[in-house]
Structure formats: structure tokens, C-alpha cells
Image (cartoon, helix red, strand yellow):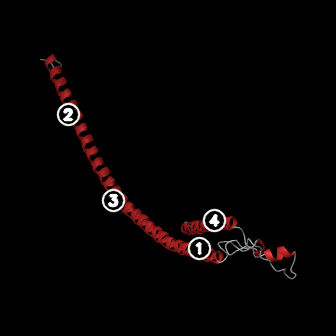
Amino acid sequence: MTWLSPTRWILLAVVFAALTLGVWRLDVSRQAIGEARADKVWVAKVKIQKAEAVLLLDTERTKVAQAERTLRDFKDKQEIQDGKNRTKVVGLEHRLRAAAAVNAGRLRDPHAERCRSGGDGPQSPVTASPGNSAVNPPEGTGLLSVQLSELLFELTREADEVNLAYASCRADAMSIREATK
């Protein structure tokens, strides 16, 4: 038997194949071990990131809750102030209507006397005509018509509502500007 006999070649091929398979299997095993180690590192890093995210989320939730409380407190204070303003406007409106009720619901033109006489000189007395009464005062008394008085009351009320809304919105805008500084 010679050193390079076919049986030895087959044996040598089987040993080589076994060694190659063993090295390949060792390489695959080492790769799996490395991947498992890397997975452990990444899992640990992800856990750390999750913990940081939970802390950040809690911090931001606290900030949002504080901002909501501040906004709610401001809204409540503003509603109280708006209510006071509305009450004041309603009171003034009632006083104006009460003053007008003296003149049968009509407003008095403060400049009527000056305009009628053409200047600041002595005023001529108003003579009562047969059709004049408490309900229908003479036209020369400086009273505005009922329709014009009602129109002025309505326009005054609408202007007051606009002014109240503006005051409320302005307070909101000022608080927002202060908060964003």
C-alpha cells in the first residue's frame, strides 16, 4: 500500500470534510454567541432609552398639567372679571333706561336748546299745543323720538358687548404674550 492510495485519499477527504464542517460549525457558533452578546447590549440600551423616555414623558406631562392649571386659573379669573364688567354695563344700561323713562322712554338731546335758539342767547319758552301730553311731549323739548332712542339703546348695548369681548380677548392675548417670553 502506498502512501497515496485511493483509500487514503478517501480517508483524507473525509477528514478534510470533517475539519471543514467543524470549522464552519465553530464559526457559526461563534457568530451566534457574538449576536447574542450584541442583542444583550442593544436590549440593555433600549431599556435605558425607555426609562429615559418615561422620565421625559412624566416631566412633560407635569409641565402640561401645570400649564393647564395656570390657563384654567386665568380663565376663571377672566370669567369673574368679565362677569363684573357685564354687571357694570347692565347697571349702567338700567340707569340710562331709568333716566330715559322719566321722559317716556326717550333720550334728551343735550344740545337741543342751543340748536333751537340758534346760539347761546336767552331761550324762548316752549308753548304747549293742544296735542301735547305726558305721553306725547312737545317736539321743542329736545327729546329724541322713541324709535331713535331705542336705536341708540340697542347700538350702545352692542358697542358695550364688543368692548367687553375686546377687553376679554386683550387680557387673553396679554397673558399669552407674557407666557411665551
- Residue positioned most to the front: 130
The three-letter code of the residue at mark 4 reads Glu
Q: In the picture, residue 151 is in which quadrant?
A: bottom right
**Which of 101/73 is in front?**
101
Count residues near mark 1 (Cα–Cα under 10 Å), then give few for <14, some for 14-19, many for 20+. some
Tell me the kind of residue under disc 1: Val
Q: Which secondary structure, mark 2?
A: helix
Horizontal and vertical percent position of residue 25: 21, 35
Say whether residue 3 is visible.
Answer: no
**Looking at the image, do the residues carrying marks 3 and 2 touch, with CB atoms under 8 Å apart?**
no
Percent coordinates x, y for residue 44 in the rendering: 30, 54
**Marks 3, 1: nearer the viewer:** 1
* Contact (Cβ within 8 Å) of mark 3 with mark 4: no
Residue at 63% from the left image edge and 75% from the top image edge: 101
Label 3 vs label 2, nearer the camera: 3
Pair 2/1: label in front: 1
Tell me the residue that label 2 is attached to.
22
